[in-house]
Image: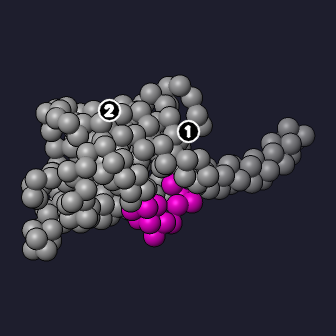
């Protein structure tokens, strides 16, 4: 079992690299940077929901087979959406990503309410945390810790409900929780990498804007200095 969990974790890391590549390319797009940093508006909210729903749905298909479970990376889009956009964005993206995973990837089944609830809880909790922080104010260690803690919270809550409502799952509940450990760690690392990439891009853009403004201010100062030097010459020539 241990070797299978290790292989599942390595498989998720490999697939997380795919999302990381997409995050890197997305972070270079100025409109996306503006959406991330702008103040709240209905348009910004809709844009964030659309972008991160696509990321979450993509993460649903980036999964590996382990035992009878299928750990995936849909939580990356949900958690980052909540951190950036708040609980409304996080919960909506969780609803979209969770529904896609439950009905499209898993084909429904009796566990679909738990898959769906897990993603919505992730989005709500990430949004509650995100309202107190910005991407720049979220340390990487905190990003990993919050992501892991949020997933552990939904696992604990839904594990209790699952054990009470479906007693046959109680016998192997501990083994099932162990099986989702690669998913928790993989998604947490993916969130950390996404935050790192996005923060780096935003800081680079901010430095570029500051440099441009500094160059413009320097040019304006030189122009004023030249004007100051030229005006006495015009006055002297006019008097002559």
Instruction: Decide if residue 81 is on the left or right side of residue 99.
Output: right
Q: Mark yes or no: residue 115 visible.
A: yes
Can you say which quadrant of the picture contains the C terminus?
A: top right
Measuring from the top left, give residue 100's x and y in whole percent. Answer: 23, 33
Q: Which residue is mark 2?
A: 96
Q: Mark yes or no: residue 35 visible.
A: no
**Compared with residue 128, is residue 45 higher up or lower down, i.e. above or below?**
above
Label 2 SS: helix
Can you say which quadrant of the picture contains the N terminus?
A: bottom left
Q: From this viewpoint, which residue is outermost toward the right?
A: 239
Determine the residue positioned at 25% across, 64% down: 174
Measuring from the top left, give residue 171's x and y in whole percent. Answer: 21, 60
Determine the residue positioned at 32% across, 32% down: 96
Mark 2 surroundings: few (<14), some (14-19) or many (≥20) residues within 10 A: many
Say whether marks 1 and 2 touch (CB < 8 Å). Answer: no
Instruction: Decide if residue 222 is on the left or right side of residue 121.
Output: right
**Compared with residue 54, is residue 10 higher up or lower down, i.e. above or below?**
below
Q: Which span is picked out in magenta?
A: 135-149
Q: Which residue is mark 1?
A: 38
Magenta: main secondary structure equals: helix
Instruction: Decide if residue 80 is on the left or right side of residue 64.
Output: right
């Amino acid at each position: 079992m241990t070797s299978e969990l290790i292989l599942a974790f390595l498989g998720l890391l490999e697939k997380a690299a795919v999302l990381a590549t997409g995050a890197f390319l997305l972070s270079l797009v100025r409109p996306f940077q503006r959406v991330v940093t702008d103040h709240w508006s209905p348009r910004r909210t809709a844009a964030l929901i659309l972008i991160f729903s696509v990321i979450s749905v993509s993460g649903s298909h980036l999964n590996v087979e382990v035992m009878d479970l299928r750990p995936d990376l849909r939580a990356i889009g949900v958690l980052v959406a909540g951190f950036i956009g708040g609980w409304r964005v996080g919960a909506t993206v969780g609803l979209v990503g969770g529904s896609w995973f439950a009905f499209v990837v898993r084909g429904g089944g009796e566990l679909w309410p738990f898959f769906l609830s897990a993603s919505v809880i992730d989005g709500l909790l990430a949004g509650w945390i995100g309202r107190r922080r910005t991407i720049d104010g979220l340390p990487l260690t905190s990003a990993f810790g919050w992501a892991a803690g949020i997933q552990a919270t939904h696992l604990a809550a839904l594990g209790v409900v699952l054990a009470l409502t479906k007693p046959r799952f109680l016998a192997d509940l501990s083994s099932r929780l162990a099986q989702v450990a690669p998913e928790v760690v993989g998604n947490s690392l993916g969130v950390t990498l996404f935050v790192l990439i996005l923060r780096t891009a935003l800081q680079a853009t901010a430095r570029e804007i500051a440099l441009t403004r500094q160059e413009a201010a320097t040019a304006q100062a030189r122009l004023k200095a030249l004007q100051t030097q030229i005006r006495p010459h015009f006055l002297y020539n006019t008097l002559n």
